[in-house]
Amino acid sequence: MSTRSRVLSLSPDALDLVADRFRVLAEPQRLRILQLLHDGEKNVTELTDSLQTTQPNVSKHLRMLQEAGLVGRRQAGNTVYCFIADPTVFDLCDLVCTSLSERVAAHAQLLAGTGRKRR
Amino acid sequence: MSTRSRVLSLSPDALDLVADRFRVLAEPQRLRILQLLHDGEKNVTELTDSLQTTQPNVSKHLRMLQEAGLVGRRQAGNTVYCFIADPTVFDLCDLVCTSLSERVAAHAQLLAGTGRKRR
DNA sequence: TCACTATATGCCGGAGTGGTAATATAGTTG
DNA sequence: CAACTATATTACCACTCCGGCATATAGTGA
């Protein structure tokens, strides 16, 4: 049961959920937030300082990440600490990274003319 | 070099590329196309028949998938056959599927009350 | 209570995108 | 050449979403 992909049997409704998750990750700022949270939990102000944007913007991104179940929250007094709730997001990003870098490498091969042309 | 995620060291520009790839996958119709292509190459008309939409719509989705390097094309006479060019997309989808199903299972636990309440 | 801080929410303008219809292009066949 | 098929492109509308601003809410401390 390992070679056959799980996606193949998904209904259209289930595909919507998968697409939703991808959409949450389709934003550089949100990926930055996930990067920052990998080191450990951070509050909204710290995230706002790291990303160079406004605090409401960060709050909005965090909301989407939380609703997607990717990020959790812990409130201590006045400040809200956020943390990674689903570490598989890093696996996702790594897969994309390797895929992208291989793609770039293949292009470089073509440009350099070192690759054997197939057609 | 296996435990540390590759994403952590990505520059903002590189994150844009990662986000772009996620955005390509953030569309149910495109996921459907990838599903259909998993069985083997199909032409645009066949895809249009399977997805219940218009042919220009399919062409546009295919264009994005091709520009992202996820789908390739082979032209035979008048018809264009499309195929999976980057099988890692299925790994991506599978990761999301498992993550989502675990999330759903956790929610079911809470609703069923079988999980020990934490607060 | 008031002032202060931390975070969330609502509104708006601009950019991007999915869907569709109409049209254009390319290839095939006669 | 004309007629037909397969695919791509364009124009347009509706919708979503990101960003910033202003404001609201909540918690703290005096």
Image (tube, coloured by chain):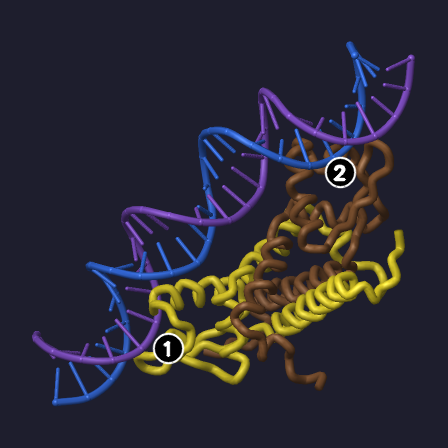
Chain colours: A yellow, B brown, C purple, D blue
- Counting every numbered tag in the picture gives 2
Amino acid under disc 1 = Asp
Question: Which numbered marker is on residue B107?
Answer: none
Q: Residue at label 2?
A: B47
Q: Is residue A19 above or below residue A99?
A: above
Q: Furthest-front residue in view?
A: A113
Q: Is residue B73 above or below residue C1?
A: above
- Which quarter of the figure is the N terminus of chain A placed in? bottom right
Q: Nearer the viewer, residue A59 or A32?
A: A32
Amino acid under disc 2 = Leu
- Is residue A21 found left or right of A99 in the rendered image? left
- Is residue B79 found left or right of A78 in the rendered image? right
Q: Nearer the viewer, residue A92 or A32?
A: A32
Query: In whole angstroms, how far apart are the C-alphas of marks 2 and 1?
Result: 47 Å
| Residue plotted at (73% across, 55% down) | B70
The mark lying in front, picked from 2 and 1, is: 1
Which chain does the numbered disc 2 sit on? Answer: B
Which chain does the numbered disc 1 sit on? Answer: A
The crowd level at tag 2 (other Cα within 10 Å; few <14, some 14-19, many 20+) is: many
Rendering quarter of residue D19: bottom left
Rendering quarter of residue C27: top right
Q: Residue at label 1?
A: A49
| Residue plotted at (57% across, 55% down) | A20
Circle 2: element type? helix
Q: Is residue A18 visible?
A: yes
Circle 1: element type? helix
Q: Nearer the viewer, residue A9 or B61?
A: B61
